Image (spheres, grey):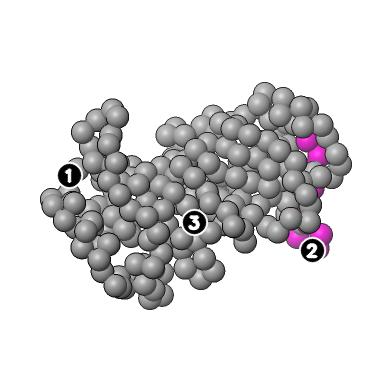
Amino acid sequence: MRIRLTFAKTEAIRYIGHLDIYRTLERWVRRAGLPLAFSQGFKPHPRIVLASALPLGYTSECEMADIWLEQDVSLQQITESLRNSAPPGLQILAISQVDPSEPALPTQLVASEYIVTFLNPIPDLETRLIELRESQSLPRTWRGKNYDLRPLIQEMELIPSPISESPRLRLVLKAQEGATGRPDEVILALGGSPEKARIHRTRLIFA
């Protein structure tokens, strides 16, 4: 049985990394008493697949994980068991059953949407945004590899802030094999500092 868990990663655990989230999901399912399935082979591992790694320091309201169970369990029981054993900082948003033959979540992801809140103002931010939109190329280096950030920026706009005067930027960044747009790289391209911003993922966009 393959289930899909949609969950939020809140401010309380934004400094918990991707691998720790994976381990937390495993412990969560075990604590809920659900029959977690394992892969075959010399080193079996829990059959849990996250749609997309969320970088350290980010929060989210749209994370997804597919989890395989060894036997069928009613969605009501799954939901109740997971809600009763939810770890601090993770919030269940939805649980559904998925066709086991459906392609893996990461292969279906085409883009992600983020809201960036700048804690410190960036001088001439609107002008910098226009220049970035009009640029034909934006060479960057990530982990020793060169790539062009510009074609990975699908949408980029300033939006009103309902609770503060801090500038907020909405980004839709493409996710494709071998290259994924990163909000922190966009912040750097605008002359800002990722350490002085809050980054929140609001939507995963699938093919």
Dividing the picture into quadrants, the one containing residue 78 is top right
Q: CA distance from mark 2 to mark 3?
A: 35 Å
Quadrant placement of the C terminus = bottom right
Q: Earlier in the sequence, mark 2 or mark 3?
A: 2
Can the viewer see residue 174 in this picture?
yes
Answer whether labels 2 and 3 touch (C-beta < 8 Å): no
In x, y percent, where is residue 37? Answer: 79, 48
- Nearer to the camera, 130 or 92: 130
Does residue 33 appear left or right of residue 181 in this picture? right
| Secondary structure beneath label 3 | strand
Q: For the magenta stretch, what is the residue range?
A: 33-43
What kind of residue is marked 2?
Phe
Q: Residue at x 51, y 70 (%)?
A: 178
Quadrant placement of the N terminus = top right
Q: Earlier in the sequence, mark 1 or mark 2?
A: 2
Label of residue 121 in the image: 1
The residue carrying pointer 3 sits among few (fewer than 14), some (14 to 19) or many (20 or more) residues within 10 Å by Cα, namely many
In x, y percent, where is residue 75? Answer: 77, 32
What kind of residue is marked 1?
Pro
Label of residue 42 in the image: 2
